[in-house]
Amino acid sequence: MSRAVRALLLVLSLFAGAAGYVGCAPKLAPALAPASYSVNADDDRFLEDFSRRTFTFFWEQADPRTGIIRDRSTTEGGPANEASAHIGSIASVGFGLSGMCIAAERGW
């Protein structure tokens, strides 16, 4: 399985796992069927770029002193608005820590 497919499955599993806790009981994801598809070079480049940009958001929005990661920002990297300038959560920190593991594996 290519790195791009693994990255996409990781992102999807993170969202699926987070979505499972919205209801009262977590929902189990169905088992994945064996892969019988391939990703072309353009898709692979897109997924690599998307993964790196996603990691960059969490890296840049982390407070250097506390490590808390801002939940929202604009495309320029600033806070979404003045009221949300200092809002972070354990959810964003969790995604950021996962992203750091992926980034370390990929040598970013």
Image (cartoon, rainbow, N blue to C red):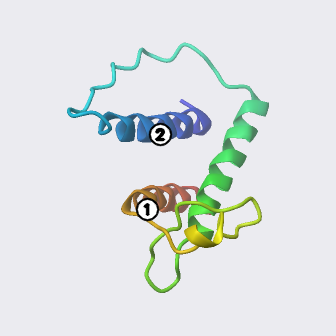
Residue 5 horizontal/vertical position (percent): 57, 32
Q: Is residue 60 left or right of residue 17?
A: right
Query: Which residue lies under the disc numbered 1?
Result: 97
Residue 48 horizontal/vertical position (percent): 68, 45
Three-letter amino acid code of the residue under disc 1: Leu
Three-letter amino acid code of the residue under disc 2: Leu
Q: Is residue 29 left or right of residue 80?
A: left
Q: Nearer the viewer, residue 74 or 14?
A: 74
Asked which quadrant contains residue 31, the reply is: top left
Residue 93 horizontal/vertical position (percent): 43, 63
Q: Residue at x 24, y 33 (%)?
A: 26
Mark 2 Cα within 10 Å, few/some/many (few <14, many 20+)? some
Q: Residue at x 41, y 64 (%)?
A: 89
Upstream in sequence: badge 1 or badge 2: 2
Mark sitting on residue 10: 2
Q: Residue at x 53, y 67 (%)?
A: 70
Mark 1 Cα within 10 Å, few/some/many (few <14, many 20+)? some
Does residue 96 sit above or below 26 in this rendering? Answer: below
Q: Residue at x 46, y 59 (%)?
A: 92
Asked which quadrant contains residue 43, the reply is: top right
Does residue 15 sit above or below 33 in this rendering? Answer: below
Q: Is residue 55 left or right of residue 100?
A: right
Q: Mark 1–mark 2 contact, CB under 8 Å?
A: no
Mark sitting on residue 77: none
> The C terminus lies in which quarter of the figure?
bottom right
Task: Give the CA separation, mark 1 to mark 2.
Answer: 13 Å
Q: Nearer the viewer, residue 16 or 2?
A: 16
